Image (cartoon, helix red, strand yellow):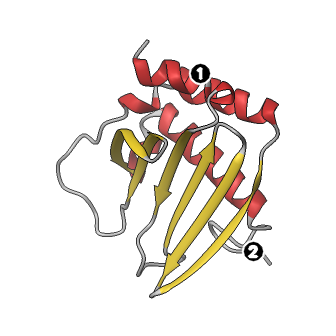
Amino acid sequence: MSAHAELLRNLGDEPDLEVGITTGTEHWRTGQIELRVRGDGEVAIRQRRAGEEHEYGGRLDPDRVRRLGEDLAGDRIDELRDPGGDRKPDDHPVRIRIARDGETLHEGAIRESERWKDDRLDRLVRTYDAIVGEFTDGALPYGKRA
């Protein structure tokens, strides 16, 4: 197990550890949405769209933080790599960042279309979607459904 995976496995015990997941791009559909979850349970979401920013936040209970860390570690999100090659214009990257006290420990990106080939990335995007949807009351990441 990598050092980053071990950190993630203990996310609930590391209040200054932060996992960031960012999708989209500022000038396309719902814009760029960044989710940050800290080991102390703090959740921060920032949407940047067409020059405007919106922020949302809240807190996950300790048990959810612990489970999230274990799931992310088990899926080895720090090992996800973009395969390279041609990319469609709307195939935006999923950016993954692990940081402690503002210092980046790991940063990587993989195009979102890879989720259909890699179950780990699919689970990451589904987890991201669920947390973002929960803390924005469904306004993000895809907007409220009619």
Q: Position of residue 87 (x, y in %)?
A: 24, 58
Q: Give the structural element (helix, strand or loop) at label 1.
A: helix
The residue most toward the left is 85
Horizontal side of 38 relative to 113 (left or right) equals right
Q: Nearer the viewer, residue 65 or 23?
A: 65
Check residue 125 in the rendering and tell me which mark sits there, or answer none: none
Q: Is residue 145 above or below residue 82?
A: below
Q: Position of residue 24 (x, y in %)?
A: 45, 66
Q: Would you name the residue on which mark 2 appears?
A: 144
Q: Amino acid at mark 1?
A: Arg
Q: Would you name the residue on which mark 1 appears?
A: 9
Q: Give the structural element (helix, strand or loop) at label 2.
A: loop
Q: Nearer the viewer, residue 36 or 76?
A: 36
- Give the position of the C terminus as an image quadrant: bottom right
Q: Mark 1 Cα within 10 Å, few/some/many (few <14, many 20+)?
A: many
Q: Position of residue 33 (x, y in %)?
A: 53, 65
Residue under the image location 17 percent in, 49 percent down: 85
Instruction: Place residue 46 in its image quadrant.
Output: bottom right
Residue under the image location 33 percent in, 43 percent down: 108
Horizontal side of 140 relative to 134 (left or right) equals left
Residue under the image location 40 percent in, 31 percent down: 78
Q: CA distance from mark 2 to mark 1?
A: 33 Å
- Give the position of the N terminus as an image quadrant: top left
Instruction: Place residue 135 in its image quadrant.
Output: bottom right
Sequence-earlier tag: 2 or 1: 1
Q: Is residue 99 above or below residue 144?
A: above
Horizontal side of 84 relative to 40 (left or right) equals left
The residue most toward the bottom is 51
Instruction: Place residue 123 in its image quadrant.
Output: top right
Q: Nearer the viewer, residue 91 or 94?
A: 94
Q: Amino acid at mark 2?
A: Lys
